[in-house]
């Protein structure tokens, strides 16, 4: 398929990936205003106590947000965050829709880059459908989840691979229930520190750099990032 040339000024904000069904999907990071913060706040309201306490220390006004949307989608349509039909999907043989995995891959690459750039840091996402005592936990790789404060969480450290970050995003349904994925910096953390020793310290020492949640009925993602630069402590904390 012939690709349409994009202006040089837009090439940095557009990510082009070829989908298995033979089409080319171009996603762009579309900046959204403060009106999107109320959408994030509604999702914070239904998070676990552990996540809410962490997010209550985060002032959304200190950051900015964008959504991944296909090139050419009208600005008015971009604002309809709770309505699907923005990102193309393919039709299965049974007539159901299989959403494109392109947004997952694009988000994973972005988060992995930020995870390494903001090291030491972790990606943390809450599992809202499966409790720690449910049989479904046995089907989850023990290397990507941890039980803390009565909840089940997926995590990745700054040495994680791209496939691991993708796996976490696929495990967590960021649309319904309205889960959140966080990238939290932990200045002063030692490389050998365990996840179990890190999580109790997030409320006092962690700084949220990114908040991700689902939009367009699970078809894509909204990403909030903090503008403020975080200083490193003078010594290790764990």
Image (cartoon, rainbow, N blue to C red):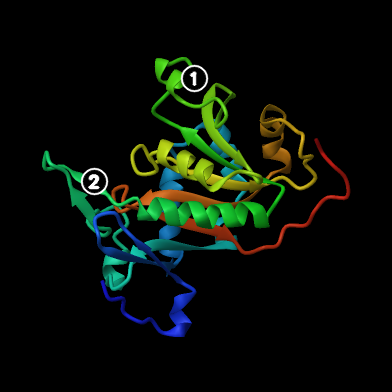
Give whichever of 93, 9 is nearer the camera.
93
* Residue 50 x %, y %: 57, 33
Q: What residue is shown at x 11% (from left), y 38% (from top)?
A: 94
Relative height, residue 220 to residue 146 (above, below):
below
Please give left or right for residue 21 compared with residue 196 in the image: left
C-alpha gap between disc 1 and disc 2: 29 Å
Crowd around label 1: few <14 · some 14–19 · many ≥20 (10 Å)? some
Q: Position of residue 189 (x, y in %)?
A: 77, 41
Task: Report crowding for label 2: few under 14, some 14 to 19, many 20 or more residues within 10 A (C-alpha).
Answer: few
Q: Residue at x 51, y 55 (%)?
A: 109
Which residue matches tag 2? Answer: 98
Query: In this rendering, is residue 4 above or below 33?
Result: below
**How many marks on residues?**
2
How far across and how far down the image is residue 101, in percent? 34, 50
Left or right? Give the position of 142 relative to 122.
left
Give whichever of discs 1 and 2 has the lower sequence position.
2
Q: For this view, does 145 lie left or right of residue 229? A: left
SS label for mark 1: loop
SS at badge 2: strand
In-front residue for pair 196/21: 21
Q: Residue furthest front?
A: 1
Q: Nearer the viewer, residue 1 or 169?
A: 1
Q: Residue at x 28, y 70 (%)?
A: 73
Residue annotated with mark 1: 132
Picture quadrant where residue 145 is located: top right
Rendered residue at 52%/51% (across/down) = 211
Q: Is residue 75 above or below residue 139?
A: below
Residue 138, image x and y in percent?
Answer: 46, 18
């Amino acid at each position: 398929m012939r690709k349409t040339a994009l202006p040089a000024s837009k090439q940095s904000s557009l990510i082009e990936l070829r989908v298995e069904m033979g089409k080319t999907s171009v996603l762009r990071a579309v900046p959204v205003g403060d009106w999107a913060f109320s959408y994030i706040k509604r999702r914070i309201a239904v998070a676990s106590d552990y996540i809410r306490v962490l997010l209550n220390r985060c002032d959304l006004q200190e950051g900015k947000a964008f959504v991944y949307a296909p090139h050419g989608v009208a600005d008015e349509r971009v604002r309809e965050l709770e309505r699907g039909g923005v990102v193309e999907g393919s039709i299965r043989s049974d007539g159901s829709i299989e959403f494109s995995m392109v947004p997952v891959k694009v988000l994973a690459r972005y988060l992995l880059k930020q995870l390494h750039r903001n090291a030491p840091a972790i990606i943390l996402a809450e599992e809202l459908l499966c409790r720690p005592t449910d049989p479904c936990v046995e089907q989850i790789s023990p290397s990507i989840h941890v039980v803390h404060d009565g909840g089940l969480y997926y995590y990745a450290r700054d040495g994680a691979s791209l496939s691991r970050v993708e796996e976490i995003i696929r495990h967590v349904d960021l649309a319904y229930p309205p889960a959140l994925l966080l990238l939290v910096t932990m200045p002063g953390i030692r490389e050998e520190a365990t996840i179990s020793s890190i999580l109790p310290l997030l409320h006092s020492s962690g700084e949220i750099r990114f908040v991700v949640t689902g939009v367009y009925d699970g078809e894509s993602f909204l990403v909030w990032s903090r503008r403020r630069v975080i200083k490193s402590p003078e010594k290790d904390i764990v």
